[in-house]
Amino acid sequence: MALYRLVGTRTSWINIIHPTQQDIDALKRLYPYFHPLNLEDSLSPDERPKIDDAEDYLFIVMHFPLWDSTHRLTRQSEVNFFVGRGFVITLHDGSLKPLKELYDSCQSQTEARQKLLDASASHTFYVIVDKLVDYCFPILRKVDQNIRRVEERLFTDEDMQLIRDIAVIRRDIIALRRIIRQQVPILENLERVERPIIQEELDEYFGDIVDHIHTLRDMIDEDFEIIAGISETADRLINHRLNAIIRILTVMSVTMLPLTLLSSIYGMNVDLPLDEHPEAFWLIAGMMLVLAVIMLIIFRRRRWI
């Protein structure tokens, strides 16, 4: 059971890391009016982002990106919020740095705790969400850096490694895009829908978060288009290199064809011209060389090589 609580003059913040059934039972005793389905959803790690309006509280599910270094992929980290008059409850897996850092700073610094919890619960909720949304910007800047590194290597000969890196970045961008896009309607709903629990003077603050999430969405959409273009360019470059190799091999094969025919004819066990000539080998070799040169000249004039 990992239930932590901070208390201010107007708001208390209950932070639950890796919620268990014991934690949910404790919340039932503290807040008996919480709907059982909302409490049940708090235990699920795969809930879709949503807002449930109740008479005395809001239940909000949001996802935020988290880099998984083992699989080299951004995965979603779920945070569940209960927001009511005088309290904010967060339930999560403890992996999001801004949430952990904010709670630790409030726990260790009186000034930070007063600044966060001496205001209304809706203001506390706004600050937490704002920290989590702003945390997405460094992640997207890291994606931009990865894209630039791939662009710099685009015209090198690292075909297989380049394709592998493009695939990893593209998969990461798709995961980030899905996470960020799902948060847009949640934050827009918080800004536009009037609720007694969310104070009216905070509408502009939530509007600022909406601007941030729109910026993030535009950034990740742009990254998606860029990596798609890089992938297409890489495919064309690889095809071009492959075609160049095939063209050279084809020229060599076609050039050798008449020479092979000539050598095959003179390898037959029949009477042929120049059979008795003392310089037959050099004459035939000269003919083969002339044929090869003529064919190469023809290929060059047609710009096949």
Image (cartoon, grey):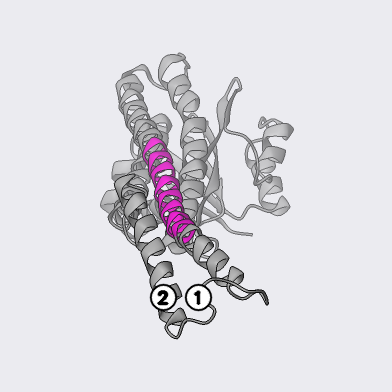
- SS assignment at label 1: loop
Image quarter in which the N terminus is found? bottom right
The dot on residue 27 is none
Q: Position of residue 92 (x, y in %)?
A: 55, 49
Q: Which residues are magenta?
A: 224-251
Query: Are the residues tagged 2 and 1 within 8 Å (C-beta)?
Result: yes
**Above or below, comparing residue 284 to residue 208 in the picture:** below
Check disc 1 and report the residue beneath it: 274
Amino acid identity at mark 2: Leu
**Which secondary structure dominates the residues rendered in magenta?**
helix
270 horizontally vs 186: left or right = right
Mark 2 and mark 1: Cα distance apart in space: 9 Å
| Nearer to me, 50 or 149 | 149
Amino acid identity at mark 1: Leu
Q: Examine the structure image and report whether residue 230 is included in the region drawn in magenta.
A: yes
The dot on residue 283 is 2
Q: Residue at x 58, y 73 (%)?
A: 266
* Callout 1 crowding tier (Cα within 10 Å): few <14, some 14–19, many ≥20: few
